[in-house]
Amino acid sequence: MHRHHRAIDLAKAKRILKWQRDPEGMRLRILEAAKQEFAAHGLAGARVDRIAANADANKRMLYYHVGNKEDLYLEVLEGAYEKIRAEERTLDLEHLDPPEAIARLIDFTWNYFLRNPEFLALLNTENLAKAKHLKRSTKVKSMHSPFVEMIRAVVTRGVESGDFRAAVDPVQLYISIAGLAFFYLSNSATLSVIFGRDLLRKDARDERLAHMTALVLAALTGNSTDVFGKGRMSALLSAEQQAN
Amino acid sequence: MHRHHRAIDLAKAKRILKWQRDPEGMRLRILEAAKQEFAAHGLAGARVDRIAANADANKRMLYYHVGNKEDLYLEVLEGAYEKIRAEERTLDLEHLDPPEAIARLIDFTWNYFLRNPEFLALLNTENLAKAKHLKRSTKVKSMHSPFVEMIRAVVTRGVESGDFRAAVDPVQLYISIAGLAFFYLSNSATLSVIFGRDLLRKDARDERLAHMTALVLAALTGNSTDVFGKGRMSALLSAEQQAN
DNA sequence: CGAGAAATTAACCCGTTGGATAAATACTGT
DNA sequence: ACAGTATTTATCCAACGGGTTAATTTCTCG
């Protein structure tokens, strides 16, 4: 909940002396604060006052710029989907070997979830609500993930090239890849307690990514050479995870 | 939220005319109502008054028999873990061929989640709270899942027999199997909207179970004969899913 | 049977919270 | 410079919700 961005700090400083108008900035700060709040506490647990405070705004501003709590929540949810869809589109799998393409896909999914834990939390919150907000959102419903078609193309290519032994339903594979990453990260708190070790430590995360990649590739290619062992598959990993 | 059990109906009927004592029964009704409430609305969204009403009790009874809202929640959570651990222990994988044992494990996990959707919701709620209640619960921490050791034994056996090609970390495999099932079911609401079809329909569920089983077994055995196709792997499936 | 303990009920308390109102302040175009 | 509008602030409030108090009823056992 602490302020990170220099821009926001300045905005705050200025507004202390004598407030000034900044509708777009305010809207952004509100949505960002709302995202953090809903992700941290769910829809019911979120507090409108806390959102306002963390956005350096007055509560009235939320209603002026966005709407009531549920409007706010839906806007955050839509924004979250927009963001992941946008990043998904930047992924170019066509010029990669089918196995590398799948590895890249897994790597992206894993790191996206890792970089955007609020996204996971928001999805859980929305599922608790039985997706009732999503159902109302024509915006989200129109944002098809490019992944399904990407996967279909890669799998087809892989089967033709002989890299893959059998065709897979792209939707199932998509859900499987997401699930392998999602469950581990979204439930890392409880799983860490159950297993008595921190699943978010760097070595644990690396191990998980290696395992997921090995599992899926072994299933598709039939080639499990050492992948389940200590091999980290470093050759297949993208640059994305060098960050940490 | 409707009353299902005949016993509870009778209890209600009796208590309408002139109430009678039933501490154990009341406690059970309270915990059952609390489980449904917490599963349906999360910790923050749960309403103590609703729990009382659905338990055919007075709000005061919750505090008398269990404690405050958080005590209630923790008791429900502990009960949920106790229940799954108990069922897990009934699973005997030792006398099965390694591939069949894995299939059985997947089948059990899948059907347990399907039969106990509240468990999934409770886990999500607890993870939203960063497992802070679990951490305090010595009870749950002492309930180790028998699955990890079961998987270790099966994998070892499978490698020795030549059924499996490589060893896998049992914890990773456990998390993977759980994740493949958990994500699909826990997020079925949003995924159904995104993909425009009901993922909980019988045929979709069967397809998912077949896919998960094929994916894991293909990875372990290297034998993907038709498993990713339309084959339903009926031979490998237990009796558990005949229910629906 | 009757008195004390256990279980249950009914009524109330009070801080919190989402949301609303109205007044004040900054900006814009003319 | 000023009228009108957009934006922000300062209060307020009614409903809700968790928790408590005290009285009432049923059970148990000497």
Image: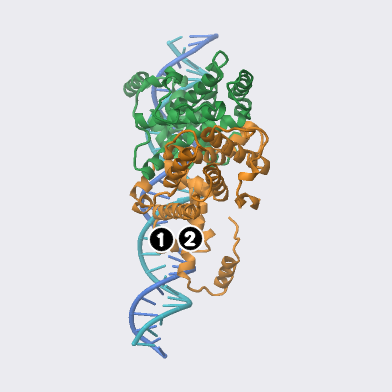
Chain colours: A orange, B green, C cyan, D blue
Query: Which quarter of the figure is the C terminus of chain B placed in?
Result: top left
> Which of A107/B140 is in front?
A107
> Which of C4/B218 is in front?
B218
Give residue A9's position: percent from left, percent from top. Answer: 59, 66
Q: Residue furthest front?
A: A161
Query: Which quarter of the figure is the N terminus of chain B placed in?
Result: top left
| Badge 1 and badge 2 both on one subunit | yes
**Mark 1 packing: few (<14 Cα in 10 Å), some, or many (20+)?**
some
Q: For mark 1, give the secondary structure.
A: loop
Real-space CA distance between mark 1 and mark 2, rounded to the nearest whole angstrom: 9 Å
Q: Which residue is mark 2?
A: A30
Q: Are marks 1 and 2 in contact (CB under 8 Å)?
A: yes
Q: Which mark is residue B151?
A: none
Which residue type carries mark 2?
Ile
- Vertical placement of B229 versus B41: above or below? above
Give residue B77's position: percent from left, percent from top. Answer: 52, 31
